[in-house]
Amino acid sequence: MSLPPLVEPAAELTVDEIRRYSRHLIIPDVGVEGQKRLKNARVLCVGAGGLGSPALMYLAAAGVGTLGIIDFDTVDESNLQRQIIHGVSDIGRSKAESAAASIREINPLVQVEIHNTALDRENVRDIFARYDLIVDGTDNFATRYMVNDAAVLLGKPYVWGSIYRFDGQASVFWAEHGPCYRCLYPEPPPPGMVPSCAEGGVLGVLCASIGSIQVNEAIKLLAGIGEPLVGRLMVYDALEMSYRKIKVRKDPNCVLCGENPTVTDLLEDYEDFCGAVSEAAQEAIVDATITATELKEWQDAGKDIFLVDVREPAEYEIVRIPGSTLIPKGEIISGEALAKLPQDKQVVLHCKSGVRSAEALAALKAAGFRDAVHVQGGVLSWIKQIDPSLPAY
């Protein structure tokens, strides 16, 4: 459905702006008035990572007058495969500062507002209130639900995107005109069911595909042109090169935007709501967690242990702890691999960072492996504490 323009047009375009945006101005649906609306718009991008990178670059190039960037992270070498707003010289630099510098190179006419902080319950309302539109480039469920809830409570539309391996999704959530994120996903998935990009990977160029869709939707909303993805979910498969649209209806029973909402304020703890690990895993790791240093001491002392790497084969090929045996978490959770585990040795589990191994530990404890333990921080801790020459990913 068509929607009215989100912002009023600016008073005028300068000669420099007319020259710069001439290819927009000659599009009848955009024209001078549409470009004036972009100039007068204030857009916040949550995250300057995989999705935020192309989104910020194209929002700047399009002439959005004020761009806000919120990101507390710093640039890491592993980011450069997909986070194209950053370069080698930015490694170690604040992502928000790095992104702002790139935006100024692309378009010095754009005003940039930097929020070099983590988005949380205490600041999200104040930050969102300063902008007309939110572009969500987050990569975790806790922040996604908080972004959605704050946008609904403030009456703000936002453009959402999600990426994983070769698959991407995008939509526009605006409770005033259609569904919100909770209408599509009323509850977060169980802990460990949906791997993060850090665990499962993402094709770098997929970020550009979904990020550009997000910018396209943002421009349509700001200028009041076309039919935004309100009430529609765009699903993209890069391997099959296919796009499909799924209708998403407003849920009358939605706890946030439904007819009788029960969520009328931000949650106290979104991390707790989404649950990084299950309750069973939290219980299992109590008094059953060792450090990478302790693991090395056990190995050096010749302790009779069976070290299990619960990551996926592709990760195992990148880097591994010496002496480990690969048994993916899924095989342990399903019970398929239990017969492979020795009964006369202490089982020690590890993954990349400790989340998956905690879930696998819970399954082992339930199966009777009472003395099993897991390595806090996983292979990343091993690299930091024991062997920095190994590649981190």
Image (cartoon, rainbow, N blue to C red):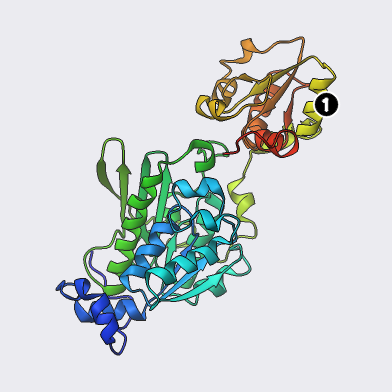
Q: Out of 392 and 362, give the one closest to the viewer.
A: 392
What residue do we see at 59% from left, 57% from top? Answer: 74
Q: Which residue is farthest bottom?
A: 11
For disc 1, the marked residue is: 297
Q: Position of residue 366 (x, y in %)?
A: 69, 23
Q: Is residue 34 visible?
A: yes
Q: Out of 273 and 132, give the one closest to the viewer.
A: 132
Q: SS class of the residue under badge 1?
A: helix
Q: Position of residue 163 (x, y in %)?
A: 42, 46
Q: Position of residue 68 (x, y in %)?
A: 48, 71
Which quarter of the image is occupied by the N terminus? bottom left
Q: Out of 287 and 55, give the one closest to the viewer.
A: 55
Quadrant assignment, res 4 = bottom left
What residue do we see at 31% from left, 56% from top? Answer: 213
So how many labels did they put on this image?
A: 1
Q: Is residue 290 visible?
A: no
Q: Position of residue 78 (x, y in %)?
A: 53, 45
Judged left or right of residue 51, residue 91 is right
Judged left or right of residue 39, residue 165 is right
Q: Which residue is farthest front?
A: 89
Q: Which residue is farthest right?
A: 301
Quadrant assignment, res 90 = bottom right
Which quarter of the image is occupied by the C terminus? top right
Classify mark 1: residues with Cα within 10 Å, few (<14), some (14-19) or many (20+): few
Give the amino acid at mark 1. Answer: Glu
Judged left or right of residue 257, residue 228 is left
